[in-house]
Image: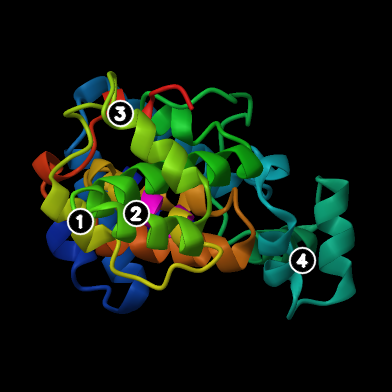
Amino acid sequence: MIVARSLAAARIPGSVLARLGGDLGTQAIEAAHELAALGTDDARRRRATWAASAIAPVPMGLRGVHATWIDAGLAELPPRARAELAAGAPRDPIGVWLVRRACAELPPLPPADRTAPPTSLAEAARLPGDVLARWLAHVGADQLALAVGMAGPEALAGAVRAAGDRVLVAWRRIVLAPRLGQLGSTRGAITRCKLTLDGRALVLIGARALAPHTHTDPSARQRLAVRLPRELGLAVRAELTAYASTPLAQAPTWTALAAPI
C-alpha cells in the first residue's frame, strides 16, 4: 500500500498506473481516485503525508496499531526485524528493509486521543481500538433495533437474546432525537443485519452502516482496521469495503453516528 500511494502521490497518470497490474496496480489506481475526490488543499496534504510515509521506515502513529498486526508483519521475518522495529531507528539498509517489510500493511495514523463518538471519518480514526469497537457495536445495535423494531416484540426479544441488552437500550433511544429519522432506511438496516448474531455481530453491522461514508476515502478503512485486533480488523475492513457503495441515503447520517451513547 505504501508503494501504491507513493506512485499516486507522484502524479503518475492513471493510464500508466493501470499497466502495473496485480494488487499494486489496483491499489495505486484506488489511491489516485482517492486523491482526485479530495479538494485541492486536502489532496496536497494527503500527498505530503503519503510521500513522508514512503521514506520513513516506521509509519507515523505505530503505537496506535493493535499489536496483533505488528506480530503478523513480523511473523515470517528474522528476529532482527523485531529488534530494529523496537528500536525505531534502523541501523543500516538491511534494518530499514526489515522494518519497512514488517510495517508494509500499516498506514500512518493520527494520535488515538479521542473517546467521544466521532463526527467524521477523521475523528473515527483517532479512536483507540477498544473505544472504536465499542462505538461500532453501539452503531450496530441501533441498526439492529431499527431492523427488528417494526416486526414486533417477539422479534425484538429474539434480537436481545442473541445480541444482548444493548439492543434493547438502542430500541428505546432510536425513537428520540438525535437518532430519530437519521438512521437510514429500515430496508437498508434489514440488509445490514443479515448475518449470524454472534459476539462480534454488532461491530460488523456497525461497520456496514459506516461503510458508505468511506466510499471516497478507501484508505480510512485500513486506518480503522489496524486499531482493532487483526482478526476483527480484517473482518471490519471487509465489511467496510463490501458496503462502501451503498447509497448514503440508506445509511445513518453523522448526526446519528455521533449521537451520545
Residue tagged 4: 94
Tag shown at residue 156: 2
Are discs 1 and 3 less than 8 Å apart at CB? Answer: no
> Is 166 positioned to the left or the right of 144 in the image?
right
Mark 2 to mark 4 CA distance (whole Å): 58 Å
> Sequence-wise, which precedes: disc 1 or disc 3?
1
Are discs 2 and 4 less than 8 Å apart at CB? Answer: no
Amino acid type assigned to the residue bearing label 1 in the image? Ala
Rendered location of residue 49, percent (x, y):
46, 35
Q: Nearer the viewer, mark 4 or mark 3?
A: 3
Q: Nearer the viewer, mark 4 or mark 1?
A: 1
The quarter of the picture where residue 30 lies is bottom left
| Element type at mark 2 | helix
Q: Residues within 10 Å of mark 1 (few under 14, many from 20)?
A: few
Mark 1 to mark 3 CA distance (whole Å): 22 Å
Rendered location of residue 160, percent (x, y):
45, 55
Which residue ends up furthest to the front in the rendered image? 153
Is most of the magenta stretch helix, strand or loop?
helix
Residue tagged 1: 151
Are discs 2 and 1 less than 8 Å apart at CB? Answer: yes
Q: Is 206 a magenta residue?
A: yes
Q: Quadrant of the N terminus?
A: bottom left
Residue tagged 3: 256
Rendered location of residue 138, percent (x, y):
46, 41
What stretch of residues is rendered in magenta?
203-207
Q: Residue at x 59, y 68 (%)?
A: 231
> Sequence-wise, which precedes: disc 2 or disc 4?
4
